[in-house]
Image (cartoon, helix red, strand yellow):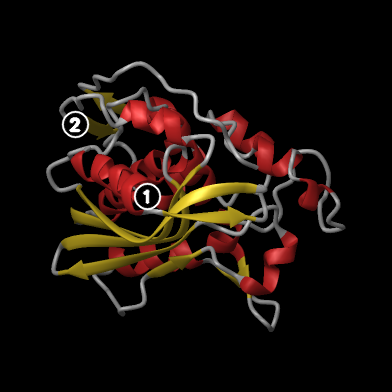
Amino acid sequence: MNQYLELCKKIINDGQWVENKRTNKKCLTLINADLQYDVENNVFPIITTRKSFWKSAIAELLGYIRGYDNAADFRKLGTKSWDANANDNSVWLSNPNRKGLDDMGRVYGVQGRSWVNSDGCVIDQLKKIINNLNSGIDDRGEILTFYNPGEFDKGCLRPCMHTHTFSLINEDLYLTSYQRSCDVPLGLNFNQIQVFTLLKLVAQITRKKPKTAYHKIVNAHIYEDQIDLMKVQIERKPFQSPSLNINPDIKSLEDLESWVTLDDFEVIGYEHHDAIKYPFSV
């Protein structure tokens, strides 16, 4: 919580105003933020100065792992986070590649599970990483990336959290996640939860010891219509961080692809202040 609050204060105090053409709004913007999460000691990085809907964040992560390309599939998992980008984004609505209601196109998990190379071959990046880690291999390229410039026109949104790099030292597993753009009031806690949970999940199914998750953000911003609400939030006193329990019966990538639901995750000891409803910019 302290590093989250310090980042919010720094954006408000030191950020510069930038006009965002996609949303037609101004943002207070800060370049370069580095966060890290103690997965080894299960210090779950959830926001306590307002209520955070952690189930939606984990549901979205499960959808990425499964390579979903439709907002309806994400809703079945327990999150509506893709409804607006799939159905209310005017640029995407007029895109000839859009297949219809709820279609997201080739974004995020689609690229991670079925990247298509120039020869038309499908590459499953995540499966390669899991297979290597199961064998104790780190080729310095255990990289899961959703960023495919050749297919930006085939999806409703360029990925914000775009690349995850796993590093194995003996039996210790680390994760470094890269984010090009971050709506700090709304998106950051989703991203924090997902980075933490991704490392914890992958360590569990590959029987490795999770250590530290590093989270690097290039463009961290707060929209002009979020500033006053953020000033209220940063004055609240944070509670102690809770922990995240994951069903120990989850033992493989196939488990994550098939039967795992939100019932297999539990946050222990979560205390929080009242919810704050920040405006969302499509």
Of 206 and 230, the residue lying toward us: 230
What amino acid type is highlighted by mark number 2? Answer: Ser
Of 207 and 4, the residue lying toward us: 4
Q: Position of residue 76 (x, y in %)?
A: 60, 29
Q: Which mark is residue 252?
A: 1
Q: Residue at coordinates 28% horizontally, 69% vertically from top-left? A: 135
On screen, residue 31 versus residue 157, left or right, reads left
Q: Residues within 10 Å of mark 1 (few under 14, many from 20)?
A: some
Label 2 sits on a secondary structure element that is loop
Q: Nearer the viewer, mark 1 or mark 2?
A: 2
Instruction: Examine the image and state in which quarter residue 2 appears.
Output: top left
- Residue at which label 2 appears: 241
Label 1 sits on a secondary structure element that is loop
Q: Position of residue 22 (x, y in %)?
A: 67, 53
| Residue 143 appears in view | yes
Residue that sits furthest to the bottom in the current view: 119
Q: Residue at coordinates 17% horizontally, 40% vertically from top-left? A: 42
Residue 241 vs 202, above or below: the answer is above
What amino acid type is highlighted by mark number 1? Answer: Ser
| Residue 197 appears in view | no
